Image (cartoon, helix red, strand yellow):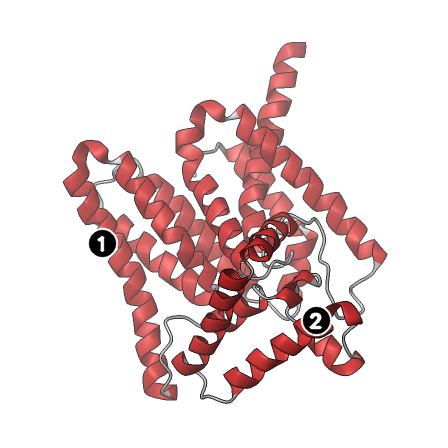
C-alpha cells in the first residue's frame, strides 16, 4: 500500500516472504491453508490502515470487516485484533466521532456477520454451538496448567502416555489426566468447555504466582526463532534450526530497525503494531510455537523490508 510503503519496500517484502523457510514448510505440509490466511489477514490489516484516513467509501469498511471475519474463520486468534483495530480507528476519527463510530460499528457487524453465519451453518449441520473452529477452551487449559512448563506444548501429554512422565512432572500429569477424563465424560461443546475453563480458573486462583510466571515464559517463547517440538520427526534436525535462526533473527532485527527509522510515522504504522501485539498477547495466553507466530512473521517481514530499504538509502545518501 503506497500510503505506508513505497514500491521498493513492497517488492523486497514480497521477495523475502516468497522464500521464507517457515512459510514454505508450513504451506507445503499439514497447514497448507496458511498462505490463504496470510493473504486474508494482511489484506484486511492494510485495508483497515487505509480507513484511518476516514475514507468516505463505506464499502471499504464493509470489505475490511468481511476480510477480518474470513481471516478469523481460518485462524480464530485473528479476531482478537479486531477490538484493538476498532479502538485505534475511533481514536483516529475523534474529530468526527459519531461518523467514525458508525463506520467502525459497520466494520464490526460485518466481521461478526461472517463468523455468525458460519456458526449457524455449523449448528444446522452438526448441532454444535461454536463461534469459530478450533478448540479454544481445550487449548487454553493445555497452556494454563503445570504440565505446560514442559516445553509449553500440547502433545507432551501424548508422549507421557507412552513413556510415562518423569518424577518431576508425575503430579502435573495426573492432574492433567483428571481434567481430561472429566472433560471427555461430557458431550463436546459448551459442557466440555466449562470443564476446561473451570480448570484454568482453579489454576490461576490456587497458583497465581506460577500462572503469572508461566505466562511470562510463554510470552518469551513466542519469539523463539526456531520450532521446539516435543514429538520427534524428520524435519526436526539441527540444520532446520540453523535455517530458522538464520532467517528469523535478521528479520526481527531489521524489523526493529524499521520501527526506529520510521518512528516519525508511527501513527501510520500503529495498525501493524497493534495487530502484532494482539497476536502476541493472545498466543501467550494459550500455547506458543513458531508456526503459531508465522502469520505475524509476514508483518515483521514488511517492517524488515522497510528497515533494510530505508537503512540502505540512508547509508547511500551519506556516501553520495
Q: Position of residue 179 (x, y in %)?
A: 56, 79
Q: Identify the residue at image location x=28%, y=66%.
A: 113
Q: Position of residue 201 (x, y in %)?
A: 47, 66
Q: Nearer the viewer, residue 28 or 284?
A: 284
Look at the image and tell me whether residue 3 can be seen.
no
Q: Is residue 261 left or right of residue 45?
A: right
Q: Identify the residue at image location x=47%, y=40%.
A: 273
Mark 2 in CB contact with mark 1 (< 8 angstroms): no
Q: Position of residue 304 (x, y in %)?
A: 60, 36
Look at the image and tell me whether residue 167 can be seen.
yes
Q: Identify the residue at image location x=30%, y=73%.
A: 117
Give the quadrant of the C terminus: top right
Quadrant in the rendering for residue 99: top left
Label 2 belongs to which residue? 156
Q: Label 2's element?
A: helix
In the rendering, which numbered label is found on residue 106?
Answer: 1
The crowding category of the residue bearing disc 2, from other C-alpha atoms within 10 Å (few below 14, some 14 to 19, many at least 20), is some
Amino acid at each position: 500500500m503506497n500510503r505506508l510503503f513505497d514500491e521498493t519496500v513492497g517488492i523486497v517484502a514480497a521477495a523475502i516472504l516468497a522464500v521464507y523457510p517457515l512459510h514454505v514448510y508450513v504451506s507445503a505440509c499439514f497447514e497448507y491453508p496458511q498462505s490463504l490466511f496470510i493473504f486474508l489477514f494482511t489484506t484486511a490489516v492494510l485495508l483497515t490502515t487505509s480507513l484511518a484516513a476516514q475514507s468516505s467509501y463505506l464499502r471499504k469498511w464493509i470489505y475490511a470487516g468481511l476480510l477480518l471475519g474470513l481471516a478469523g474463520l481460518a485462524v480464530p486468534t485473528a479476531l482478537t485484533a479486531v477490538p484493538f483495530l476498532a479502538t485505534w480507528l475511533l481514536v483516529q476519527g475523534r474529530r468526527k466521532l459519531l461518523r467514525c463510530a458508525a463506520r467502525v460499528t459497520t466494520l464490526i457487524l460485518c466481521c461478526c456477520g461472517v463468523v455468525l453465519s458460519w456458526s449457524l451453518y455449523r449448528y444446522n449441520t452438526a448441532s454444535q454451538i461454536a463461534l469459530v473452529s478450533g478448540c479454544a477452551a481445550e487449548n487454553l487449559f493445555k497452556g494454563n496448567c503445570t504440565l505446560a512448563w514442559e516445553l509449553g506444548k500440547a502433545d507432551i501429554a501424548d508422549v507421557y502416555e507412552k513413556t510415562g512422565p518423569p518424577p518431576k512432572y508425575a503430579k502435573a500429569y495426573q492432574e492433567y489426566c483428571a481434567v481430561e477424563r472429566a472433560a471427555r465424560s461430557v458431550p463436546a461443546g459448551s459442557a466440555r468447555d466449562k470443564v476446561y475453563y473451570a480448570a484454568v480458573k482453579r489454576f490461576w486462583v490456587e497458583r497465581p504466582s506460577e500462572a503469572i510466571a508461566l505466562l511470562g515464559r510463554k510470552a518469551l517463547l513466542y519469539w523463539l526463532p526456531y520450532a521446539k517440538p516435543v514429538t520427534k520427526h524428520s524435519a526436526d534436525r539441527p540444520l532446520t534450526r540453523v535455517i530458522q535462526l538464520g532467517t528469523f533473527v535478521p528479520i526481527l532485527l531489521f524489523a526493529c530497525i524499521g520501527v526506529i527509522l520510521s518512528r516519525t510515522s508511527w501513527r501510520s504504522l500503529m495498525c501493524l503494531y497493534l495487530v502484532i501485539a494482539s497476536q502476541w498477547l493472545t498466543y501467550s495466553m494459550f500455547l506458543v510455537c513458531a508456526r503459531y507466530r508465522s502469520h505475524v512473521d509476514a508483518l515483521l517481514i514488511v517492517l524488515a523490508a522497510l528497515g533494510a530499504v530505508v537503512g540502505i538509502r540512508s547509508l547511500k545518501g551519506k556516501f553520495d
